[in-house]
Image (spheres, rainbow, N blue to C red):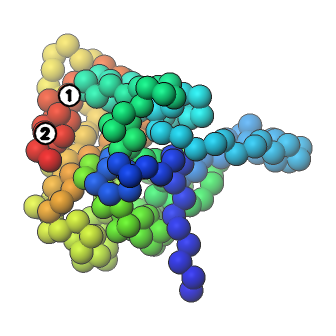
């Protein structure tokens, strides 16, 4: 079977080719509006590739909320072409599944079993690039990464895992609403951060910002 590269939404740079920062969602979303356009025979031109935070070509709800979260952790990324640095070029974006669905939920339509079964493409990408930080955006993605059937292959890419993922919930009395969990995990060469999906109902930016010390410690440790 020929090798088919896993799709990457962002431009390739030396800084993200090896030991970069990967932002990984669930799949390539397919909205009701996309469906209507397809049925009407209207197809939009593919956007030109650029760095992850370039607002001119990656002005999506997913990207914008991720940038809000990064900023709340004091990870500030330039959003206009010409201002990018090594930091902006170190980020790259993909999705675990090379599919489109009319749903973004990872807890019903897309199960952990589906993610494990369809992991070959994203694992090939991880093997090629070996990022130093991985943000998995979706509650089931870190579960899939740790599935026993994938463990040997994952450890061959990153090194031995330190143990099960650590679960974090903020205890700040100033943050209201439901307590969603953030997960962190260390492998020999890589830190993995498991985040709720950006469209999780009830999830506030204020709550995500409260994880700033944890996120910063992950970056400092590499």
Q: Quadrant of the N terminus?
A: bottom right
* Residue found at x 47% / y 51%: 12
Going 54% across and 58% down the picture, which residue do you hit?
7
For disc 2, the neighbor class at 10 Å (few under 14, some 14 to 19, many from 20) is few
Residue drawn at (32%, 57%) of the image: 18
Q: Quadrant of residue 117?
A: bottom left
Residue 174, visible in the rendered structure: yes
Q: Secondary structure at mark 1?
A: helix
User: Could you say which disc has been placed on residue 136 in the image?
Assistant: none
Residue at 32% in and 25% down: 76
Residue 97: image location, x then y, percent: 51, 60
Identify which residue, 79 or 168, lies in the foreground: 79
> What percent of the width, then of the height, locates residue 143?
31, 59
Please say if 108 is above or below 52.
Answer: below
- Which residue is identified by label 2? 220
Q: Are marks 1 and 2 in contact (CB under 8 Å)?
A: no
Q: Is residue 160 above or below residue 84?
A: below
Farthest residue, direction right: 40
Quadrant of res 90: top left
Estimate how packed mark 1 is, as few (under 14), some (14 to 19) or many (20 or more) residues with alpha carbons within 10 Å. some
> Which residue bears the numbered disc 1?
212
In this orientation, does residue 177 appear?
A: no
Q: Nearer the viewer, residue 59 or 82?
A: 82
């Amino acid at each position: 079977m020929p090798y088919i590269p896993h799709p990457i939404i962002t431009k390739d740079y030396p800084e993200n080719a090896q030991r970069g920062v990967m932002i990984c969602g669930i799949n390539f979303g397919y909205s009701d509006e996309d469906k209507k356009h397809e049925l009407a025979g209207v197809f939009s031109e593919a956007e030109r590739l650029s760095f992850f935070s370039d607002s001119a070509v990656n002005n999506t709800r997913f990207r914008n909320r991720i940038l809000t979260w990064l900023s709340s952790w004091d990870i500030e990324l330039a959003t206009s072409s010409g201002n990018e640095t090594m930091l902006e070029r170190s980020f790259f974006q993909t999705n675990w599944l090379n599919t489109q669905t009319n749903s973004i939920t990872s807890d019903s339509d897309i199960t952990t079993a589906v993610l494990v079964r369809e992991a070959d493409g994203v694992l090939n990408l991880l093997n090629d690039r070996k990022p130093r930080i991985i943000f998995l955006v979706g509650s089931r993605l870190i579960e899939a990464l740790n599935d026993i059937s994938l463990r040997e292959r994952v450890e061959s890419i990153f090194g031995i895992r330190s143990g099960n993922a650590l679960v974090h919930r903020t205890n700040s009395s100033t943050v209201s609403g439901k307590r969603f969990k953030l997960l962190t995990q260390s492998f020999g060469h890589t830190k993995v951060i498991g985040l709720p999906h950006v469209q999780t109902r009830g999830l506030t930016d204020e709550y995500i910002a409260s994880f700033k010390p944890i996120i910063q410690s992950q970056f400092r440790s590499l």
